[in-house]
């Protein structure tokens, strides 16, 4: 094989010496093909010959051969040995200094190719090559020849950005060559020097960095000429963009100079000053803070700077569009003069404002007062590019004004609307007035920016554009009707119209419907499929607006009849066409579904035409899912559309879909069958439905609870609406349901659907599905330990404890339908309970079932019930005790007057059983506080429960105190006006234990749903959280837990308190020596840190703050404490690694400023060695720490510009060289990629 290759290469080399240029070209081309093969291996002699020949061809007289020879260099450097690469580099560097221009150019391209292709991972190749090139480039840069200089600077920039770490030893040489070039008379040389310097300073040491910056600042303080000033300011801005975090120490000095130079009458200088300000704001967020007012003033001054144009002359006709060709001609001729550079100053000011707005959330209200009116006034800007930047600055302002998620659901969030949002509402008429004429301009870019801004307005102020539709709709109409509009323009217009229709009440559009319907219908027939697709989506939304149903249906005089035919005919035409894009087909089906669902009563005569088309589409594999969704809309319509033309055919077809391996199709098919059974059960025979539901048994499984839930719902609906369809097939689905009941995963909605099914089956009164049959099927597997319906009835069942809860709930649900058997069944279970021979599992099941029956029925007639349950508190099994506690609480719910006094009395009388009795009390409070009827029963007993709980706030057992805290919290929710002040009063108690319970109870008053207590809680939560200053560590710990709960569930409660609370939170993250003690264990001394739990709670709270957003948090201060935690205890390290990874995503620029410290601490963890005689757990802990630390490293390495940090690069290199770490790191990276793709799949 090798000899064949050598022969082939030798043959090609021979052809390359031919006098025929075509031979040389083809031979070079073939060589490149060979070099790109992985299998090629060259010996030393062949390498030399190939390298020599390729270098010779670089000097070929034919340009095409030269170009191919340059392309060969890329694969060649990866195939030859190090000494040959050095030969190539030496030759290219030498040719760069040649007097022949063509040879110089081709050599420059060759060097760039070599640099781009050099492998970064090689041990000595890249450093050696860098060393060779650097010295020669430094000499070339100092040459007189400008073209040599330019090429050398270009190559040096490439080299520095790709192999910066290898060039650190040569920085002084490179700087010596670069610094004088900043004073070059040629602008191109100065620009390329700036690029090279900026890239170099990313890796430079502090002395070199500060030396260059000081040189620039001294040059600005004592300028040689105006050109030098511009160059130095540009260079400062460029350095800041590349390595800004290191410029922070020089900001104050730089800003004084920028302010001074920005006042000079030089447009180019002003532009550069503003660009530098933009870079400083973006890359040095903390250091620039004192200078923000000055930058803002500067930007506001220059964003309106247009000395050559009189805008006042245009003010009279702002409402008239300048859309005639003459106007455009005059505009371009008279005002876009090549000498007028003021537009660049305005553009730089607008871009700087955008960065200011995006990064300074805390100044938002101030921006709305000062900046917003100025930007609105500048929408009239005459230069298109500048106008676009002004729009983007305003869009950044609107994005920062979007309402937070928790405010949207909070009843007390109106006070959050106070600042920026209220100011925006006031300014809305001015914004619309300024935009109105621009929406009809010739410029596509301006119109697209208008739609972008309006869309952001919709996000920031949902529903606020309704009163301004008279100004907005003509602009949409103009873009859709204008023959000059591009496809993107039309798609943008339709997309905005769709958002507008979704974001407002239907009645506000009614005056505009006569204009909008023809407009959208015309777009539906656009030949470009993307426009037609978007138009059908808008048309579907328009149908909901023209004829709203359900909650949106408001009585109005609007006559829909003139539009129904127009909308229907247009969609029908699209629906009938089969040879169109798949997306158009799907949108047409969805749109027709919406039309029939909302307007079907006005289209009775057309149903025979369009419903069979739906049937055809349902049978087509490509369109069946869209058809199922459309038919679901129609079947659910309150208009009760006549589906008789297709009903008998649809159900069997849907039955076949339930067999398909297509989850979405199964779910939507089940939903559609359910809707048909609910609304059309009288229109078809049971046998037709049976053909579909016969497929259901296979879908009832805990492997996919969502599909199982839909299947159970359909069976329940069938049992209620058409029970005869279940005759003969219940033996097929009931075993699947019973297996599901015994599943440990059954809970929530799926469990509720199972309960509904059992109730529906009993109501149906079918043979084999009566009450006693179903109860025995549920009880036998538990009481006898085997399933008689299984293939092997004698096989013993091992049930999860959740199965007992589920079975008990199912039996109680069945008993609700047959009230007369409730007491006899409970009595029977009581007798089972009293048998001494029963297993623990049987006792648990009996207790839980009695409890669930007692929840719905008064069992006080069974005299022995309370005593028998309480006797079970003495059992040896913890599960039996827990079941007994649950049962006592549940039966009390059904008979509060009888059992609640008993529980309260027993709590007092039996201190040893107090914990279990308190759990029973918690069950009573939890169950009754969720329904209005339950609240009415509970309220009279609240004072007695409250008094009893307060007696036990200071009991000795911590578990009991925790349950007391939970009961107190849940009880406060029942009557907040009276009980919350009593909790506040108890907070002043002398006892630390009492204060702990009270603060702990507050956690249970906070939920993620709106509650009546929220307004009161917002006023008083500060008092509870100020327990962070309590002298007792335990009180501080529970205060941290309560703070964490508030931040997680309802951030609006604590948002305004953060400035006060955060310093106390941070103080709890520190190791406190007074909480560390030594314990003697025989001959050994063991250190115990009593402050660990508090620190852990504090870091957990910080992590939650991170998840909820950092808009009110000083990130730099936050990071100080995260970094301190990186060298703390194992548990805290694990939390801080998670926080580090999250910070890298949320605020990468600020993490970049501290990257060196982060890397050092992560390196310490990864290189830590466990002592040789340590136990196995120590090794496992260390492995887990390394894995978490490397996850953080992976996240840090994803930050833009992090690859320029020398410490991180060195650490990554050492990871690659350490097999153990390299293996973990590769696994972590693969895991993160898989995780991200899973998230993306979930979002789709």
Image: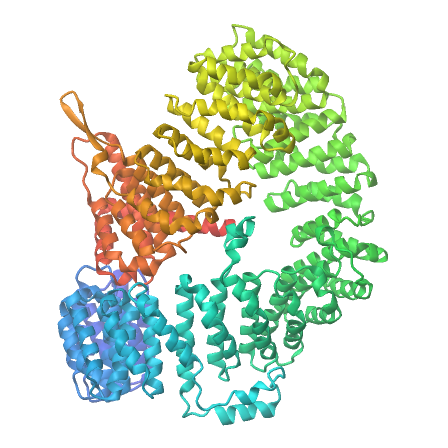
- The one nearer the camera, 291 or 630, is 291
In depth, the one of 607 and 1105 nearer the eye is 1105
Residue 5, image quadrant? bottom left
Q: Quadrant of the N terminus?
A: bottom left
Number of callouts in the render?
0
Residue 858 in sight? yes
| Residue farthest to the right, as pictured | 605
Residue 246 vs residue 357: left or right?
left
Q: Report the residue at 33% width, 42% height from top.
A: 1098
Residue 30 in which image quadrant = bottom left
Q: Is residue 439 above or below residue 339?
A: above
1154 on left or right of 475: left
Q: Is residue 1230 visible?
A: no
Residue for point 71% across, 36% down: 693
Image spot of residue 515 (x, y percent): 73, 72
Specify the color scheme: rainbow
Q: Tell me: 922 left or right of 1028.
A: right
Name which quarter of the figure residue 698 lies in.
Answer: top right
Q: Where's residue 609, x and y in %?
A: 82, 57
On the image, the x and y values in percent for residue 497 come to: 64, 66
Considering depth in this image, is 837 or 831 the residue closer to the camera? 831
Q: Residue at x 55, y 21 (%)?
A: 889
Q: In the picture shown, does residue 616 fall above or below 842? A: below
Q: Nearer the viewer, residue 1068 or 611?
A: 1068
Taking the view exactly as shown, the residue that stands out farthest to the top is: 836
Q: Please provide percent x and percent y for residue 1136.
A: 31, 45
């Amino acid at each position: 094989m090798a000899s064949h290759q050598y022969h082939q290469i030798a043959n090609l080399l021979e052809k390359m010496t031919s006098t025929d240029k075509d031979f040389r070209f083809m031979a070079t081309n073939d060589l490149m093909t060979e070099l790109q093969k992985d299998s090629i291996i060259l010996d030393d002699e062949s390498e030399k010959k190939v390298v020599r020949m390729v270098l010779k061809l670089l000097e070929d007289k034919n340009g095409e051969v030269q170009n191919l020879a340059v392309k060969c260099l890329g694969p060649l450097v990866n195939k030859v040995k190090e000494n040959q690469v050095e030969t190539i580099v030496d030759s290219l560097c030498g040719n760069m200094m040649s007097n022949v221009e063509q040879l110089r150019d081709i050599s420059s391209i060759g060097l760039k190719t070599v640099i781009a292709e050099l492998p970064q991972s090689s041990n000595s190749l890249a450093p050696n090559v860098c060393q060779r090139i650097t010295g020669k480039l430094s000499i070339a840069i100092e040459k007189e020849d400008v073209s040599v200089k330019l090429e050398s600077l270009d190559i040096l920039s490439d080299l520095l950005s790709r192999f910066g770490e290898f060039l650190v030893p040569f920085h002084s040489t490179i700087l010596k060559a670069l610094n004088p070039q900043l004073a070059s008379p040629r602008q191109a040389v100065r620009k390329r020097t700036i690029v090279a310097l900026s890239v170099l300073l990313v890796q430079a040491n502090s002395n070199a960095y500060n030396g260059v910056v000081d040189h620039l600042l001294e040059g600005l303080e004592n300028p040689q000429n105006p050109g030098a000033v511009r160059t130095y300011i540009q260079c400062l801005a460029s350095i800041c963009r590349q390595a800004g975090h290191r410029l922070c120490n020089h900001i104050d000095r730089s800003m004084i100079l920028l302010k001074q130079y920005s006042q000079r009458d030089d447009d180019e200088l002003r532009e550069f000053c503003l660009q530098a300000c933009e870079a400083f704001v973006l890359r040095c967020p903390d250091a620039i803070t004192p200078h923000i007012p000055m930058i803002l003033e500067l930007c506001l001054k220059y964003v309106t700077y247009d000395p050559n144009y009189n805008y006042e002359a245009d003010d009279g006709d702002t409402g008239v569009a300048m859309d005639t060709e003459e106007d455009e001609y005059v505009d371009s001729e008279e005002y876009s003069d090549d000498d007028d550079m003021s537009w660049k100053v305005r553009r730089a000011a607008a871009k700087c404002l955008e960065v200011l707005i995006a990064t300074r959330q805390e100044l938002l209200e101030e921006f709305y007062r000062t900046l917003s009116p100025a930007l609105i006034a500048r929408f009239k800007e005459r230069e298109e590019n500048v106008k676009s930047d002004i729009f983007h600055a305003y869009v950044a302002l609107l994005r920062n004004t979007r309402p937070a998620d928790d405010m949207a659901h909070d009843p007390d969030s109106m006070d959050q609307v106070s600042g920026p949002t209220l100011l925006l509402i006031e300014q809305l008429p001015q914004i619309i007035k300024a935009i109105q004429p621009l929406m009809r301009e010739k410029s596509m870019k301006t119109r697209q920016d208008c739609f972008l801004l309006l869309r952001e307005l919709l996000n920031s102020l949902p529903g606020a554009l309704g009163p301004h539709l008279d100004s907005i709709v003509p602009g949409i109409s103009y873009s859709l009707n204008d023959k000059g509009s591009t496809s993107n323009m039309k798609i943008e217009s339709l997309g905005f119209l769709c958002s507008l229709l979704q974001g407002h009440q239907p009645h506000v559009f009614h005056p505009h419907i006569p204009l909008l319907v023809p407009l959208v219908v015309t777009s539906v027939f656009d030949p470009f499929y993307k426009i037609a697709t978007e138009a059908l989506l808008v048309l579907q939304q328009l149908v909901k607006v023209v004829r709203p149903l359900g909650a949106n249906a408001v009585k109005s005089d609007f006559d829909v009849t003139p539009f129904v035919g127009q909308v229907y005919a247009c969609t029908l035409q699209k629906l009938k066409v089969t040879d169109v894009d798949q997306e158009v087909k799907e949108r047409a089906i969805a749109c027709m579904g919406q039309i029939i669902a909302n307007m079907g009563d006005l289209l009775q005569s057309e149903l025979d035409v369009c419903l069979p088309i739906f049937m055809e589409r349902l049978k087509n594999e490509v369109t069946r899912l869209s058809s199922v969704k459309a038919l679901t809309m129609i079947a659910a319509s309150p208009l009760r559309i006549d589906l008789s033309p297709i009903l008998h055919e649809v159900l069997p077809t849907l039955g076949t879909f339930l067999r398909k391996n297509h989850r979405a199709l199964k779910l939507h098919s089940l939903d559609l069958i359910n809707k048909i059974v609910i609304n059309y059960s009288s229109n078809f025979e049971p046998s037709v439905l049976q053909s579909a539901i016969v497929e259901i048994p296979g879908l009832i499984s805990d492997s996919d609870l969502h599909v199982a839930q839909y299947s159970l719902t359909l069976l329940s609906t069938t049992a209620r609406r058409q029970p005869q369809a279940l005759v003969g097939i219940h033996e097929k689905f009931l075993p699947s349901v019973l297996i599901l009941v015994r599943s440990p995963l059954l809970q929530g909605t799926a469990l509720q659907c199972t309960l509904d099914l059992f109730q529906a089956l009993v109501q149906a009164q079918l043979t084999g599905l009566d009450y006693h049959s179903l109860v025995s099927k549920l009880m036998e597997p538990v009481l006898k330990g085997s399933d008689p319906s299984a293939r092997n009835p004698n096989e013993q069942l091992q049930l999860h404890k959740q199965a007992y809860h589920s079975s008990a709930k199912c039996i109680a649900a069945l008993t609700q339908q047959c009230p007369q058997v409730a007491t006899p069944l409970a009595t029977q279970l009581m007798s089972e309970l009293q048998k001494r021979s029963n297993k623990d599992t049987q006792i648990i099941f009996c207790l839980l079932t009695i409890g669930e029956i007692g929840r719905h029925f008064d069992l006080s007639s069974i005299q022995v019930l309370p005593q028998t349950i309480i006797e079970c508190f003495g059992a040896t099994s913890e599960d039996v005790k827990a079941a007994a506690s649950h049962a006592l609480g549940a039966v009390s719910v059904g008979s509060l007057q009888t059992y609640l006094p008993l529980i309260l009395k027993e709590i007092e009388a039996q201190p040893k059983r107090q914990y279990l009795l308190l759990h029973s009390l918690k069950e009573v409070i939890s169950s009754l506080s969720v329904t209005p009827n339950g609240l009415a029963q509970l309220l009279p007993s609240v004072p007695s429960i409250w008094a009893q709980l307060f007696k036990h706030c200071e009991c000795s057992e911590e578990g009991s105190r925790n349950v007391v805290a939970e009961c107190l919290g849940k009880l406060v929710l029942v009557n907040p006006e009276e009980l919350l002040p009593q909790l506040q009063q108890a907070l002043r108690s002398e006892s630390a234990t009492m204060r702990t319970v009270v603060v702990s109870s507050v956690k249970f008053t906070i939920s993620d749903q709106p509650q009546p207590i929220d307004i009161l809680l917002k006023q008083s939560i500060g008092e509870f959280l100020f327990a962070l200053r309590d002298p007792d560590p335990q009180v501080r710990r529970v205060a941290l837990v309560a703070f964490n709960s508030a931040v997680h569930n309802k951030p609006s409660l604590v948002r305004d308190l953060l400035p006060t609370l955060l310093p106390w939170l941070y103080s709890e993250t520190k190791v406190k020596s007074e909480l560390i003690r030594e314990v003697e264990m025989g001959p050994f001394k063991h250190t115990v840190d009593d402050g660990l739990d508090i620190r852990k709670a504090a870091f957990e709270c910080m992590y939650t703050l991170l998840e909820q957003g950092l808009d009110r948090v000083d990130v730099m201060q936050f990071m100080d404490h995260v970094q301190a935690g990186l060298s703390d205890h194992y548990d805290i390290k694990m939390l801080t690694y998670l926080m580090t990874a999250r910070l890298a995503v949320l605020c990468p620029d600020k993490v970049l400023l501290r990257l060196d410290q982060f890397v050092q601490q992560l390196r310490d963890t990864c290189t830590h060695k466990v002592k040789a005689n340590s136990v196995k757990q120590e090794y496992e802990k260390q492995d887990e720490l390394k894995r978490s630390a490397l996850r953080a490293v992976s996240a840090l390495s994803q930050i833009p510009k992090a690859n320029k940090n020398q410490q991180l690069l060195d650490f990554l290199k050492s990871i690659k060289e350490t097999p153990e770490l390299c293996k973990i790191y590769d696994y972590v990276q693969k895991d993160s990629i898989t995780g991200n793709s899973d998230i993306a799949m979930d979002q789709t």
